[in-house]
Amino acid sequence: MTHASDDVSQAIAGELSLMDPAVRASRARFEPLLDPEFVEVGSSGRRYTYEEMLAWLPDHPGGSAGGPRYEPDDIAGVVLAPGLVHLTYETRFDGLRARRSSLWRRQSAEGGWRMYYHQGTPVPPDVD
């Protein structure tokens, strides 16, 4: 049995991996990190499903080694239930800030952690 802090650490590692340009550019590397029932509400307000994200992510900003990168800050997590972790943090990307929330779940003790839900909310420039 894993400890709660191990579960949070593994979810954070997955979250950071999804911000890595090398992972974002490779379907083979990011697909195992997304739950088949994945849904995202992006900072644009657009809703993305698992299939849409698989098709869209390699061409999405942040997937180029020489381009802007997501810069996460203050990542915190809490275990909501066995196999379910909630992460919150803020990112800076190309001069823009967003507050983010993700749910990570593990279907079995042998399975890996996968992002089940993600939401990004833009932070206006005048907000601390």
Image: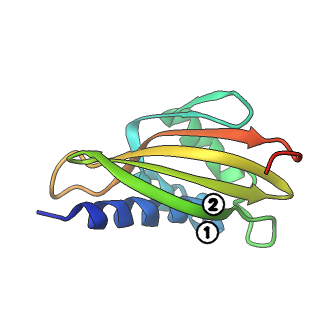
On the rendered structure, is 97 left or right of 54?
Answer: right
Q: For this rendering, which residue is in front, 69 or 120?
A: 120
Looking at the image, which residue is at 37% across and 50% down? 114
Amino acid residing under circle 2: Ala
Q: Are marks 1 and 2 in contact (CB under 8 Å)?
A: yes
Spatial CA span between label 1 and label 2: 5 Å
10 Å neighbourhood of mark 2: few (<14), some, or many (≥20)? many
For the question of whether residue 28 can be seen, the reply is: no
Provide the secondary structure element on which disc 1 rests: helix
Residue 25 percent coordinates (x, y)? 63, 60
Looking at the image, which residue is at 35% across and 64% down? 10
Residue 81 percent coordinates (x, y)? 24, 43
10 Å neighbourhood of mark 1: few (<14), some, or many (≥20)? some
Residue closest to the far bottom? 66
Looking at the image, which residue is at 33% across and 55% down? 113
Residue closest to the far left? 1
Q: Quadrant of the N terminus?
A: bottom left
Q: For this rendering, which residue is in front, 100 or 22?
A: 100
What numbered label is drawn on residue 25?
Answer: 2
Amino acid residing under circle 1: Ala
Looking at the image, which residue is at 82% across and 45% down? 127
Residue 43, above or below 4? above
For the question of whether residue 99 can be seen, the reply is: yes
Q: Which residue is mark 1?
A: 22
